[in-house]
Each structure stands twice: as structure tokens, then as C-alpha cells.
Image: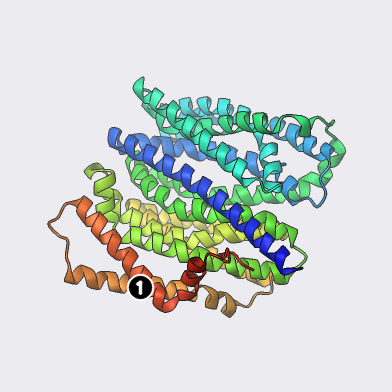
Amino acid sequence: MSQCEKQGIYLSFFKNVLWSLGGNVGVQLLGLLTNIILARLLTPEIFGVVAITMIFITLVHNTQEAGFSSVIVNSKTLSNKLVATTFYSNIIFSIVLCLLIWFFAPLISNFYGNSQIEKLLYYSIIGLIIGSFGITFRGLLTRRSEFKVLTMVDLISEILGIILTFILIFYEFYYIAVSARVMSRPAFRAIMMLLVCGLKDVKAVPSIRLLPQILPYSSNVLGVRLANYLKNNLDYLIAGKFIGSQGIGFYTLGFQWSTIAKFYISGSVAKVLFPEVSKHQNDLEKVRSIFLSVVKKLMFVILPFCVILALVAQDFILTIYGKQWAKAVPVLQILMISGALTSLGTLVSRVYQGLGKPSREFKITLLSIITFIPFIIIGSIYGVIGLAFAVLFHTLIFDSILVFSVLRIMNLPLMLFIKNIFPAIKSVVGMTILYFIFQFLLPTEGGTPIFSLIFNTFIGIVCYMLMTAIFNKEVIFQFMRNKLTVFKY
């Protein structure tokens, strides 16, 4: 491959990452701002009830998106019949899932002792059915690396969901308002993707004979998604019964911020990494190179974000959310550290899929789910903080196993992987030590929370940049040179 062709690949990959990251960060920021406003207007109990309901709605979302359409991205050749078959299969599959929600809604509501849960589950069915019409088109756009289009669709859908949220707030439908943004987003996405893509890609006659080609890969991906869903939501499913809606409300706040690293920063890069690894799945040397480069740059961003937010958590909560959310401070600190760890797990999940090894990830995730249950039960005995620690310890164990396993698949030595991320780790450790030295020399006690938040965040950023200049200056030079080598492989 010529140097010019390589540069073209670097440029394309970098642009796709920027679009994916920009879209996810934009959606997350809009969602966070909306939730901050709602949190100041409403109580932690309302957020707790909605959080429990969203567990089941998210289950259907994940099942829809990871089912039949995942084969579109991974298939080496794509026919019109295959696309049409996944399109109609997704719709039928989604209807079946919604019927299950309808049937189980009263039982779920009775289990948690809140009638609002049943109503919210019924309302969610509308968005889920409409959303099923857009899933195949999302797979096609991902395969074609049209991340700019996907980003615009996601951002517009988020804005429409926010508008709907505040309309419902105006009419005092508080429980529905908090969940409306997430429940309506699949429907808005589907409508826009139908407008963008049209029906030309699904006009072929679907073929049942293609299901043996679709099901093996899709079922493995779906199994991984469902397993990851359980892994990510068992805490809500089980602890929601023990620590109550208020405790779940505090936990939700901390979890929401930790997901920025896991789903939105790492997840954005993972979306682009998946088709890239799929293209080169027969060239492990190239896959290793891509993986190491992406991980190095990802840790440069994620580690300081998580640690700085954990350091300024108290001032952050008091300033942004108010005193009624003060009990969420230690929960946020613990879960931000967990978020930094799980960001790697999010990334390697797409590597498993790109290499055609989702079954390996599924086995590890299944084991982690089984062992997560006693962690949650024991942690919940000590309240919401005990639950947060249970999540942290479990994450440390099983996300490490996920990473070690994918390293073996790629024939990538562990020491080379550690060497690759060690500069970012040293920079963050040095930053934390320097931060506490500044805290001792320049205490902000007695000041307003907003002043302390701004001052301490600034100190954290400055300390990190200083430590990066010492331990990880290569990354800084790459950014400063602006030669699009940030994701060079």
C-alpha cells in the first residue's frame, strides 16, 4: 500500500471517529443538560422509578439493535435479499418483544411496588415499534462508514426528544417526561433514516433461506449484547428491590456520568473500530496496530476525565444538582473509577465482534453475570455506597479478563499492551499527587461550591498537562503537529 493510500485511510478513519465522537458527545451533553434541569425540578425518587423502568426499555433497545442487522456490517458480501430479510425480521422480532413487555408490565410493576412503572412500559411500546423500521438502515449506514449522517440523525432525534420532554413537564406528566427522551429517540431516528435512505435497499423479496446465514453471527452478537445488558443492569434489577427508589436515584446520577467514558467516548471510537477491524480481520498485525494506537489515545482522554471528576465530585454535585443530591457524591466518585475501567471493555467488545469471535466474549460475559449477583446482594446490604463498591470490584476483575482474552486472540503480548497505556497511567497518578499538593497549599474551603468547582477543575487539568508533558509528551506532539496521526496504525 502506498503512502498516499495509507494517509487516505488515516484521514478517513480519523474523520469517522470525530463524527462518531462528536455525535455521541453531543447527544450525551444534551441529555445531561436536560437531566440536570429535571433533577433541579424533580425529586430523586422520580428518577429512581424511571431508572428501574428504563432497565426493561433498554433491554428491548439492545436486543433490537444487536439482532439481525448486525450481520449487515460484518458480511463480506451484501445482497439486496439479505438486507430485506434483516429489515422484515427486525420488525417481526420487535413486535414479539413489545408483546412480551405488554404481558410482563403488570408483574414488573408489582415486583417493585410502583404502578408508574407499568404505565411507562406501555408508553414505551409505541417508540419501540416505530424504531424497528430504522434498525437495518442504521446497519447499512455503519457499513458504508456514513458516520456524518448517523451523527446528524442522532443529534436531531435527541433535540426532538428534549422538546417532547419539556412539553410533558409543562403539562405535569413528570414520570413520562423524565423517560420521554429515551423512549421516543428510536422512533425519531427511524423516521429520519427512512427519509434519508428511502426504501430502495429493502425492496427485494425477503428469503427465509438466508436465516441460516444470518442467525449464527447475529445470535452470538445478540447473546453478547444481552449478556452485557444484564451485566450493566443487574445492579438496578436486584438493588432496586433492596435500596429503594431514592437510593437508585442517587446511584443513577453517578452511573450516568460514568457512562460518558464507557458508552460515549469509548463507545464512539468503538463504533468506528468495529468496521475497521472487520475489514482487516485476516491481518492480525494490522488489527494489533490499530488496537494499540486507539487504546493509547483513548486512555489519554478517558483517564483524566474520570479522575478529575471524581476529585471535584462534591463541588460538582452541589453546584450542578443542588443539596438534595449530596448523598450521590461518594457514589459518583466510585463509579467514575469504574467507568474508566469499563471503557476498555467497551472497546474490546467491538474487537471481538470485528474478528468474528463474539462467542468468546459471550462466555466471559456470561460468567461475569453469574458472579455479579452475589456482589450486588452483598453490596446492597451496605446501601447505595456498598452497591457502588460492588460494581467497582466486579468491573476490575472481569473487564481485565475480557482484555486479556482479546490480547490472546490478537497474539498481542500483555507487556506490550501495558507499555502502550502506561504513560497515561503515570500521568494521571502524577496529576492526582500534584492536585492534593495544590489542595494543601491553596485550600478552597469557605468558598462557594461553584468557585471551588471551577478552581479545582482548572488545577486538575493543569496538573495533568504538566504530568503528560513529562510522561506522555509523544501524544501531545502528535496533536500539536496536526498531521492526523492520532489514530495512525
Q: Secondary structure at mark 1?
A: helix
What's the residue type where badge 1 is placed? Leu
Q: Furthest-top residue in view?
A: 171
Neighbor class of circle 1 (other Cα within 10 Å; few <14, some 14-19, many 20+) is some
Q: Residue at x 69, y 67 (%)?
A: 287
Q: Residue at x 46, y 51 (%)?
A: 259
Which quadrant of the figure has residue 410? bottom right
In the displayed structure, 86 sits above or below 3; it is: above
Q: Residue at x 23, y 70 (%)?
A: 438
Task: Tell me where residue 116 appears, x and y as whole percent.
Answer: 42, 27
Taking depth in this image into account, of 198 and 135 the one nearest to the observer is 198
In the displayed structure, 14 sits above or below 24; it is: below
In the displayed structure, 338 sits above or below 428; it is: above
Taking depth in this image into account, of 375 and 17 the one nearest to the observer is 17
Task: Tell me where residue 222 appears, x and y as whole percent.
Answer: 67, 47
Task: Tell me where residue 360 appears, x and y as whole percent.
Answer: 68, 61
Is residue 367 among what the camera can see?
A: no
Apparent side of residue 270 relative to residue 35 in the rendered image (left or right):
right
In the displayed structure, 220 sits above or below 472; it is: above
Apparent side of residue 443 relative to residue 401 in the rendered image (left or right):
left
Q: Which residue is mark 1?
A: 466
Q: Assign the N terminus to one quadrant of the image.
A: bottom right
Is residue 428 among what the camera can see?
A: yes
